[in-house]
Amino acid sequence: MPDLDELWIPLVDEPIGGIVDRIVRDDPKLAAQIETPHRILAFRTFAYIRTGIVLGQLLFDHDLPDWDGSESWVEALLRDPAHRAAIEREVRAVADEIAADPQYADDEPLAPDEGARDRFRAFAREHLGRSG
C-alpha cells in the first residue's frame, strides 16, 4: 500500500489540477472569489471532483479516436471547445457557490487588497525618497 503522501501529490499534479489552475489563472474575477484560505480549500476540493465528473461524462458520451500515444484522453477531449467550455462552466459554478456561502463571509484574503497596496506604495515612495 503506498504512503498517503505518495497518493496526494499525483492527485494535484494530474490533469485535473492543471485544468482547474489554468481556469483560475485566466480569470481574475474567479480568482478573487476564492482568495481566502478556507475558500481555496473548499474550491479546490469541489472543483477537482466536479471537473473529474464532467470529464468522465464527456468520455462516456463521446467517442475518442484510437489511442496513438500522442496525447491523453483528457487532452483529446479538451481539443473540442464545447468540452472545454463545459468544464470552465463547472469550475466557475463551484467558485460562485463557494463565494456565496455565508460560512466564508468573514474569511480574510491571503493577499492585501488594492487599498493596502496603494498605502504601502505611498509609504515606500515617501521613505525611500528621503533616504536616497
Image (tube, rainbow, N blue to C red):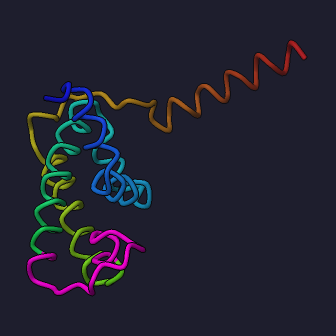
Residue 19 lies in what quarter of the image? Answer: bottom left
| Residue at position x 9%, y 34% in the image | 103
| Residue at position x 40%, y 58% in the image | 22
Where residue 10 appears, as percent x and y from the top left, is 29, 42
Where residue 90 appears, as percent x and y from the top left, is 18, 65
Quadrant of the image for the N terminus? top left
In this view, the residue farthest toward the top is: 131
Residue 92 lies in what quarter of the image? Answer: bottom left
Quadrant of the image for the C terminus? top right
Q: Is 67 one of the magenta-colored residues? A: yes
Q: Nearer the viewer, residue 89 or 130?
A: 89
Is 69 left or right of 53, judged from the image as shown? right
| Residue at position x 46%, y 30% in the image | 112
The total of numbered circles placed on residues is 0
Above/below status of 49 relative to 114: below
In this view, the residue farthest toward the right is: 132
Magenta-tinted stretch: 58-78
Where residue 41 appears, as percent x and y from the top left, is 22, 36
| Residue at position x 35%, y 47% in the image | 32
Above/below status of 33 relative to 2: below
Is 33 left or right of 63, judged from the image as shown? right
Residue 84 lies in what quarter of the image? Answer: bottom left
Above/below status of 59 relative to 112: below
Q: Is 96 one of the magenta-colored residues? A: no
Q: Nearer the viewer, residue 59 or 101?
A: 59
Where residue 73 appears, as percent x and y from the top left, is 27, 72
Above/below status of 25 relative to 73: above
Q: Nearer the viewer, residue 115 or 82?
A: 82
